Amino acid sequence: MVKRITAIVFIFVCASVAWAILGGTIFSRTYDSNSRSSGQVESLWGTAQNQTPPKASFVQVNVKDEESLEDGKKVVRKVKEEVEVPLPLDSSRIDVALDLEHRQKGLLWYSTYKVNYGAVYSFHNPGDKEQLVTFALTFPASQAIYDDLVFTIDDVPATITNEKNSASSATKVGPGKSATLKIGYRSQGLNEWRYSFGSAEISQVRDFTLNMKTNFKDIDFPDNTISPSTKHETSNGWDLNWSYKNLLSGYQIAMVMP
């Protein structure tokens, strides 16, 4: 009886050790695979995206007096100074469609998605002079592709200048006049999509609407983000809406992919 119990205990211990080694091997392979594969997925598919609103501004030349000493005498010269003056953003109408497509790399599955982004922004020139206004859009990720890019000013296709991770174009806007910037593109990212109201910690937005459609039902909003104003479940996902008349916030709009 003692021999049998000893044999059973020995077999149990050996099996436990074997399962522990197997589990450790699988865990190690998964951990190593995640660190390597995540970078590979980002390089092939794209990273998480964070879209910010475009900016509109013009360069104003101010003349000021600058004093200096020459041969012990005070000399005053007129000096020109260029100052960038931003145009107020009056309204934002944004439509976002998120299409989740899980992809496997190595031992793991990753939450990759396609995004269809379209927006109409309205700016106005509050001054009493016509200005050459530059409209600039910063893309939501530097490591991504942007197809079917739309960039029109007052429904006229603009000649775009690309700089690093942004696109810009300039046109004249009359005194007190408004200009409409239409943006659109198709892209793809990983894990989450965000919209920030601005680069400042606390930003003010007026007459803002963002409509988001998803092809998945397991929606999740990260901490320190704004929940939608309304939401409606569809046959394969959700229709979400964020609407604000005059919002002051340091939070973002965001969606985490399941």
Image (cartoon, rainbow, N blue to C red):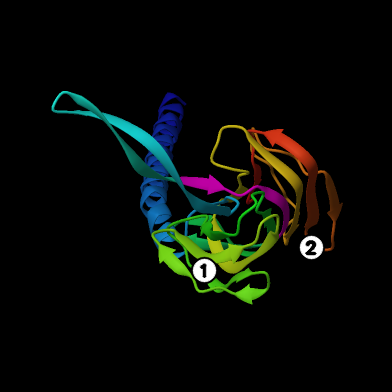
Residue 146: image tag: 1
Q: Work out whether mark 2 precedes mark 1 in sequence or the reverse, and give the earlier one.
A: 1
Q: Is residue 88 magenta?
A: yes
The span picked out in magenta is: 83-96
Q: Which residue is mark 2?
A: 236
* Percent position of residue 211, x then y: 76, 56
The answer to whether residue 58 is left or right of residue 181 is left
Along the line of sight, which residue is nearer the eye, 121 or 14? 121
Q: Residue at x 64, y 40 (%)?
A: 252
Q: Nearer the viewer, residue 170 or 111?
A: 170
Percent across and percent down for residue 57 are 54, 52
Element assignment for label 1: loop
> In this orientation, does residue 33 appear?
yes
User: In the rendered image of this protein, does residue 136 appear above or below residue 19?
Assistant: below
Please tell me which residue lies in front, 155 or 36. 155
Asked if residue 97 shows in the view, the reply is no
Please tell me the numbered disc located at residue 188.
none
The amino acid type of the residue labelled 1 equals Tyr
Label 2, secondary structure: give it. loop
Q: How many discs appear?
A: 2
